Image: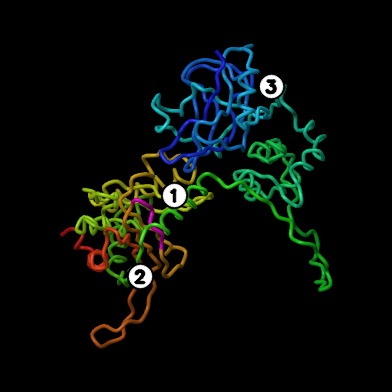
Amino acid sequence: MAEKFLMPKLSPTMEEGQISRWVMNEGDSYEGGDTLAEVDTDKATMEMTALSAGTLLKIIKGAGESAALGEAIAIIGKEGEDISALLGETASNGNKAESSETPAPADAQPAGKQQPPSQPAASNPEGEKQVPSETTNGQQPKTLAEKDSETAKSMASAVENGRLIVSPIAARMAAENNVDLRSIDGSGPNGRIIKRDIEEALLAGDKGQKQKSDGPESAFQSSTQVGASVFRDENTSRMRQVIASRLAESIGPIPTFYLTTEIEMDNTLALRKEVNSNVGEEQKISVNDIVVKAAAMSLIKHPFANSSYQDKTIRFYNQADIGVAVAIDEGLITPVIRGANLKGFLEISAEIKDLAAKAKVKKLQPEDYTGATFSISNLGMFGIKEFTAIINPPEAGILAVGAAAEVPVVRYGEIVIRSIMNVTMSCDHRVIDGATGAKFLQTFKQMLEQPGMMLA
């Protein structure tokens, strides 16, 4: 019997998903375990796979379109079934019943495990080896030549009042490959330029119109008249929406105060040099790896800094699970180093490298980025001297780590050069008082200035 396929929950924090692409086309039959579609959640791109065989009868939400949890994105059933009643229901509920892309079935689950949707397997949309042919309402695939003949019509719908309708992934791919978006015929809803359009342009050898000069630069003309700048609006990615929501959640309700201290890093830098001189290139550790270890050890000594406010209770954690902020194209994600207080520098370094690599290709699993007890954001590698970071609820604190720089300081009545690093701790005043935060930073500072204290 035909039925609606509803957007499933693919990650613990997901409230809405954006269709990245449909792997199956309308009219396609599938077997249990087949991948039907890829969905961009707030943290990663997830595969949805079928649990049992069926036929994809209608796509309701096409590539680039978003749907809330429980909203119909497709109709599935047996080939030839009458779905007019279901189409009427979805239309009356505000769902679009027409699309040029393909959907996923109601008996679908995230790929990898036959478990509830909260345990999906991530997919890297940038790593696809094949580009699926485009279909329109179940018709035969369009060729690039046919698409070229419709460029004027598509661009008319894709460009309106100076705006281009482009998916975030397509915009990034275009920028990375110097593709002129105005030369692309958008195949998504309402002429939206999606990832597949960029891939097809690249495969066809069309790199767009790169802005370059074939001759000497023309003389500057101060009288040149230009109109208002052309702009484009891009749909906000789910990750960016969740970041905005959670940070607004943090800075408003959470009473936050900040503590800053200076740390002499000379002994830590010497320790790092010594460790790296005895390991292979792929095992070399960073200053941040030592910072993570020192923070984890300090948290165990100061339980309130390693806790979270739970309205009527305070939850204390037995180990330090450190979230390490990693910047990716669509925002910020914090992979978690579990039990960092129990691990050595080499193990912490290897885990951070592995999780950061997965984060950049959106292959993190929910368990990789949820459940931290404390976080660290390090912008020292960008030359940032000092900054403040926003607490990631329900954690009670976060460290903002700046760059270590050589500066003249007075020691024992003499001016000497020391490598000084500024660190600022953002504290949730509901569980961390000023003295508590200061004592934590005092221990943290001691461990970095005298690394042997991490063994005490």
Colour scheme in the image? rainbow
Nearest to viewer (mark 2 / mark 3): 3
Disc 2 marks a residue whose amino acid type is Met
Q: Is residue 163 left or right of residue 374?
A: right
**Mark 2 to mark 1 CA distance (whole Å):** 24 Å
* Left or right: 163, with 239 as reference point: right
Task: Tell me the SS state at disc 2.
Answer: strand
Residue drawn at (46%, 55%), measured in percent from left and top?
Answer: 248
Q: What amino acid type should be assigned to the residue bearing mark 3? A: Gly
Q: Residue at x 52, y 27 (%)?
A: 6
Q: Secondary structure at mark 3?
A: loop
Image quadrant assignment for residue 57: top right
Between 112 and 316, the one nearer to me in the picture: 316
Judging depth in this view, the residue of 176 and 376 nearest the camera is: 376
Main SS, magenta region, reads loop
Q: Quadrant of residue 285?
A: bottom left
User: Vertically, is 250 above or below 38?
Assistant: below
Residue 168 % position (x, y): 60, 46
Q: Earlier in the sequence, mark 2 or mark 3?
A: 3
Magenta-highlighted residues: 389-394
Secondary-structure class at tag 1: strand
Question: Residue under circle 1?
Answer: 333
Q: Could you say which disc has been placed on residue 421 in the image?
A: 2
Mark 2, Cα crowd under 10 Å, few <14 / some 14-19 / many 20+, is many
Is disc 3 surrounded by few (<14), some (14 to 19) or many (20+) residues within 10 Å? some
Look at the image and tell me in which quarter the C terminus lies.
bottom left
Residue 195 visible at all: yes
In primary-sequence order, the first of circles 2 and 1 is: 1
Viewer-side label of 2, 1 = 1
Res 445 visible: no
Residue marked by disc 3:
138
